[in-house]
Amino acid sequence: MTIREISKTEAARYMGVRGIPDDKTAELLDKYEPIVRDALRPAYVYREAETEFRSNGVYLTGLGVPLEGNSIRGLLTGCRRAIVMAATVSAEADRLISRISVSDMAGALAVDCLCSAAIEQVCDLAEEEIFSHAKAENRTMRFSPGYGDLPINVQPELLRYLNAQRRIGLTCGESCMLIPTKSVTAIIGVSDDSVHKQKSGCGICSMRESCSFRNSGDCKF
């Protein structure tokens, strides 16, 4: 998988920029975008499963624990299948951020935000590739552990389910945060019919109290 260009507009948004970046910010993003793009090693894995709804959560074929919470149940309502995916831009992102921060803190922020934009692009590209094989006109948004009331502690089970450590070098720590940090796991529901439009946005996000995008009025969800 190759990212031809990292979205500097999206990276600027992660930097807290609203509207057109000032010259200094634009210069930083122009300087570091090719450096970041050359360093990253994007990769993803996925697995398709059938869904089973029980009183204690939604079960996926082969996953030993339920997906708990009203958010994921609502998302997968009407979906007989689901795709579980994991994506990363590799540990090179963390190493690059750390290295740049030694001499250029503003540059390190730009690199961090470019990496954040890059992993979202990787997820978009992965989804395109997945569904070019697993045909599904009707599918839900991507939904990750920690969003809504889907517990983040399901993260280790999803990684084991995907054999993500061996296949793309993706693990998580005791707090269930992903390592490398610029990585994502997500669940996408697949339906034969039109999918239920799950409510999105700040109202169901577990990060709503501390989210800088929400506080600045720049959340895109």
Image (cartoon, helix red, strand yellow):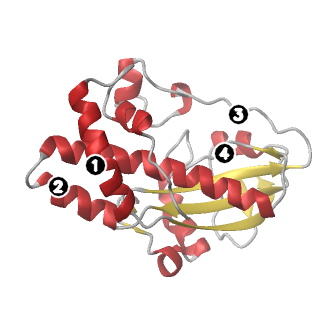
Labels 1 and 2 touching (C-beta < 8 A) = yes
The residue carrying pointer 3 sits among few (fewer than 14), some (14 to 19) or many (20 or more) residues within 10 Å by Cα, namely some
Disc 4: which residue: 72
Question: For this view, does 212 lie left or right of residue 89?
Answer: left
Q: CA distance from mark 3 to mark 2?
A: 40 Å
Q: Which is nearer the N-term, disc 1 or disc 4?
A: 1
The residue carrying pointer 4 sits among few (fewer than 14), some (14 to 19) or many (20 or more) residues within 10 Å by Cα, namely many
Q: CA distance from mark 1 to mark 4?
A: 37 Å
Q: Residue at x 55, y 41 (%)?
A: 149
Q: Which is nearer the N-term, disc 1 or disc 3?
A: 1
Q: Secondary structure at mark 2?
A: helix
Observer-side mark, 1 or 3, equals 1
| Residue 100, disc | 2
| Residue type at tag 2 | Ile
Observer-side mark, 1 or 4, equals 1
Q: CA distance from mark 1 to mark 2?
A: 10 Å
Q: Residue at x 28, y 49 (%)?
A: 32
Q: Is residue 64 visible?
A: yes
Q: Which is nearer the N-term, disc 3 or disc 2?
A: 2
| Residue 19, disc | none
